[in-house]
Each structure stands twice: as C-alpha cells, then as structure tokens.
Amino acid sequence: MIARLLSFVSRFELILANASLAALVLVLAAQIFFRYVLHIGLSWSEEISRFVFVWFVYISASLAAQRGSHIRVTLFARLLPVPDRFVFLLADLVWVIFNAFVVAAGVMLVTRTLKYPVYSTSLFIPLAYIYLVIPLAHALMILRILERQWRAWRYGEPLIANEAVQASEDAA
C-alpha cells in the first residue's frame, strides 16, 4: 500500500516537473518568436514563465531529494570521527524540521491569500495557486527525505546519488 502510494507520488512529481519544464520552454519560445519575428510583445508570457519556473524548481527539488542528488556538503561529514550515516541522519533531521516550518508557513500564506485574494498583474490569477507549491513541495521533500533514510537503513542504499558508484571507482 505504501509502496503504491510512493510510486504514485513519484509519477505525479515527475509528470508535474516535466510538464512545467515543457510549458516553460514553449512559453519562452513563443515569447521570443512573437517579440523578434512578429515584433509583438506578449503581455502574459513573462508572468506565466515566472510562475511555471517557480513550480518547476520546487517540484524538482523534491525529486532531487528523492534521488539523493540534492545539494549536500559532505566534506565536513567525512572529517568527523562519527560514521557518515549518523551525520547524514542528523542533517536530514534538521532538514525535515526546516521543511516542516516551511510547510506550516506556506499553508498560512496560502490560506491568507485565499481569504484576502491577491491577483497576478497581467493574468489576474489568484496568487494562492502559485504559492500552493511551497507547502506542497516541502511536504513532498519531507516524505522523500524520510523515504531515502528508510531505504538507507533498511536496504543499505546510499543516501547520496552515485555514492556507491564513486566508492567502487575509488577502490579500483
């Protein structure tokens, strides 16, 4: 049951990230075409591209957390006399707490902008829909961090992407 839910969430994240990237590319290409070929400016393209980019970045951060490719400084962890897995567990705990605060603040932001609507300048889209990505992505990151830690402790999977590949290359 949990594996199916995680699989569904993974597909959802991947589809949303890919759709956001495709929309960003299409809108920017249309903006360039209209501006430089037709000499007509699109008033909505910059706003849409900004909103889609924000969604793409947040959802991609969750995907990076799932795959263990999120930015992580490992130099200091390797210098400590404590095993890496304990240092990364502590670091991930801090990361989960930070994400929980961002989820709470994001929910307050979304509810406030739903109660007192603020609209985008050219499209008049309620900004609550744009801000919704903040608590959503950080909640997904919490899920992904916990999932990664569980797999590391349960199955011995590396916490950092390509860490096992790097270790085998170093040994050779």
Image (tube, grey):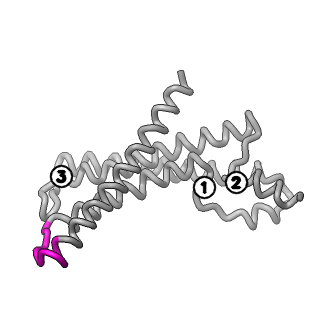
**Residues under numbered marks 1 and 2 in contact, where contact means CB atoms less than 8 Å apart:** yes
**Given the image, on which type of amino acid does mark 2 rest?**
Asn
**Residue drawn where x is 15% and y is 52% of the image:** 117
Report which residue position mark 2 lands on. Answer: 162
Magenta span: predominant SS is loop
Compare residues 122 and 146 and report the one nearer the observer. 122
Up-down relation of residue 38 to residue 77 (above or below): below
What type is the residue that disc 1 sits on?
A: Ser
Q: Report the Cα–Cα distance between label 2 and label 3.
A: 41 Å
Amino acid type, residue under disc 3 in the picture:
Pro
Residue 155: say if magenta: no
State the residue at coordinates (46%, 48%): 138
Magenta span? 34-43
- Circles 3 and 1, Cβ within 8 Å, touching? The answer is no
Disc 1 element: loop
Q: Which residue is mark 1?
A: 69
Q: Residue at x 66, y 53 (%)?
A: 161
Which numbered mark, 2 or 3, is in the foreground of this view? 2
Say left or right for 55 vs 84: left
Image position of 139 (left or right of 87): left
Residue at mark 3 to residue at mark 1: CA–CA distance: 33 Å
Number of marks present in the image shown: 3
Closer to us: mark 1 or mark 2?
2
Q: Residues within 10 Å of mark 1 (few under 14, many from 20)?
A: some
* Residue bearing the label numbered 3: 126
**Residue 81 versus residue 107 in the image, above or below:** below
